[in-house]
Image (cartoon, rainbow, N blue to C red):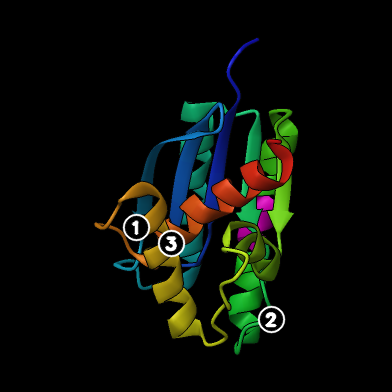
Amino acid sequence: ISECKLISLDTSTSSTGYAVYISGNLHRYNLLDFKRIKNTEDRINEMILKIYDVINKENPQIVVAEMTVVPRNVQAQRNLTMILGAIQGKCLEKNIYFYLFRPSEWRKLVNDTNEKLPRKRDELKAWSKRKVLEKYNITDINDDVSDAILVGQAYINKFGK
């Protein structure tokens, strides 16, 4: 049996966290940061191209991402949807299985059974980083990367049994 490679993503229009799992084990993670590009369209295009680079380089069987939730801002929603659509298109082109998680779904899959999930955005970011510290002893990351790591772990928890 060959090893299965999974890439999990926490996408945004300015920085995207990603994690690479091989046969259910976290192998590496990184942040694609384009905050320095002020023009939104240019930034989104660079983000999509960089995500394509990661997919092409890693050549996974599975790509998992967090679904967009209705944010405070309609334009941000449109931009995120465009990024996810571009990723889905790349996966279709390369015959890679693409899966989207609702934020509440992936969080439940990595949460401890007796633990109450926070509600507020800032608390959820802190929770995500704390979970990655507990599970992987990783500290030097932001919440985009910790979310990406946990999205991958959630997929493994859901389907890897």
Relative image position of residue 12 (x, y in whole percent): 51, 66
Task: Point out which mark residue 133 bears.
Answer: 1
> Looking at the image, is mark 2 or mark 1 earlier in the sequence?
2
* Earlier residue among tags 3 and 2: 2
Per the image, label 2 sits on a secondary structure element best described as loop
- Residue under numbered circle 3: 131
Numbered disc 3: secondary structure:
helix
Residue 159, horizontal then vertical, whole percent: 73, 40
Q: Nearer the viewer, mark 2 or mark 1?
A: 1
Picture coordinates of residue 116, whole percent (x, y): 58, 78
Residue ranking furthest to the front: 114
- Kindly identify the residue that appears in the image at 47 percent across and 51 percent down: 149
Q: Residues within 10 Å of mark 1 (few under 14, many from 20)?
A: some
Range covered by the magenta-colored residues: 82-86
Look at the picture and state if 22 lies above or below 118: above
- Is 108 placed above or below 159 here? below
| Res 89 → quadrant | top right
Distance between mark 1 and mark 3 Cα atoms: 5 Å
| Amino acid found under the numbered disc labelled 3 | Lys
